[in-house]
Structures are given as structure tokens and as C-alpha cells.
Image: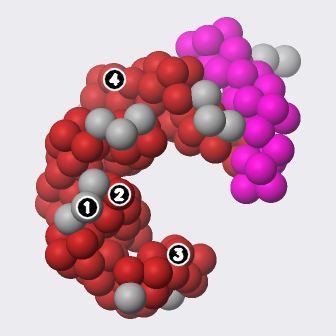
Amino acid sequence: NAPSGQTVLTYCNMGMVRADQERWDEAIVLYDQSLELCRTTRNVVHEPAVHLNRGETLIGKDDLDAAQVAVERARRGFGRLGDSLGEADALRLAGRISSEQGNWLDARQSLARSIGINREFGESVSLGEALHELGIVELRSGDSHSAREALQEAERIFAKAGAAPDLGRVQKALAEMG
């Protein structure tokens, strides 16, 4: 009885729960199990999303080099599948990694591409997330005007979508700006 795509997703979802709990090492083990099933079953459809989630977990764990590898694998996989929104998510995380490394130019470029792709599909929480990341980059790099613009647009999108946790993070960033 071969494992199904559902089993791949189950491991990935369990990893996401552990990552939300900041149980990084447990999450990584579950993502690795999911990726191993992707390889053995030749399930290329779910593989990029698993790499993306694994990359985000590695960012949380502050392993930026490994995160960069995972996010790049996700981006290439989404590209092969023609999944533009997946690619936009991978670009958003690439921007976050560059930001964490203090590389403002690369961060802005990745986030601008993510925002551009997301805008093609209309307003979404994903667009708000990319704008939030851009706002943080602008804030960290000293451009408070651009930071406020990006954060305010993200705030409006999250409020409209009812995305309370995201809205709270953006409002906190805006409040800290004064």
C-alpha cells in the first residue's frame, strides 16, 4: 500500500503545527519525512510547498543558509509547476532572508517581485504579507516614509480580510513607528 499525496500533506501539516508552536526541530523532521515521501512517490505537486514551509521554519530557527536553499528549491519547483502565487510566496521569504542578513537591495528586489505577482491576482492576504515584509525592510533600512506606506496598505488588506494575527503584527509595527 503506497503512501498517497494525502500522507505527504499530513506530514507537512503536522510540521506547520509544530512550526506555529516554534518547535522548529520537530517541524523540520516532519517536513523531511514529507519530502522523502514526495521523492519516493514522485509527487512533484506538493514538494515546492513543503520546501517553502521548511524554509520558513529554518528562518524561525535562524538557520538562514539552509533556509535560503529550501526557499530557492521552492521557488524553482513552483516555477516548474507554473504556480505564480507559490513563486510569489517563495520570493517573499527570500526577501525576509535577505532582510535578516541586512541585504536591503536584494530584500527589496525579491519583495517587489512578490508584490508585483500578487497584485496580478488582486488583493489577498499574501499581498498583505509581502507588503508587511517590505514595510519591515524599509523600517530597518531607515526609510520610515516608505515603511509607513507599505505597512498601512498591508493593514488595510488584513483588516478587510479579517486576518487578525497579521493585522495585529502590522498594527504593532505601525505603533512602534509612532
SS state under label 4: helix
Residue type marked 2: Arg
Disc 4 target residue: 76
Residue topped by disc 3 = 169
Which residue has dot 2 on it?
Answer: 140
Few, some or many C-alpha atoms within 10 Å of disc 4 (few <14, some 14-19, many ≥20)?
some
In the shown orientation, is residue 80 left or right of residue 43?
left
Q: Earlier in the sequence, mark 3 or mark 4?
A: 4
Mark 4 and mark 2: span between their CA atoms?
28 Å
Residue 4 lies, with reference to residue 90, above or below; the image says above
Crowd tier of the residue under label 1, counting other residues whose Cα lies within 10 Å: few below 14, some 14–19, many 20 or above:
few
Colour style of the rendered protein structure: secondary structure
Residue 126 can be seen in this image: no
The x, y position of residue 169, in whole percent, is: 53, 75
Q: CA distance from mark 3 to mark 4?
A: 29 Å
Please state if 144 lies on the left or on the right of 5 as rendered. Answer: left
Circles 2 and 1 in contact, beta carbons < 8 Å: yes
Secondary structure of the residue carrying tag 1 is loop
User: Mark 4, mark 2: which one is toward the viewer?
Assistant: 2
Cα–Cα span, label 2 and label 1:
5 Å
Q: Counting residues from the N terminus, which is met first, the one under dot 1 or under dot 4?
A: 4
What is the three-letter code of the residue carrying label 4? Arg
Front residue of this view, candidates 138 and 9: 138
Residue 50 is a magenta residue: no
Circle 1 sits on which residue? 142
Q: Nearer the viewer, mark 3 or mark 1?
A: 1
Range covered by the magenta-colored residues: 17-46
- The answer to whether residue 92 is above or below residue 146 is above
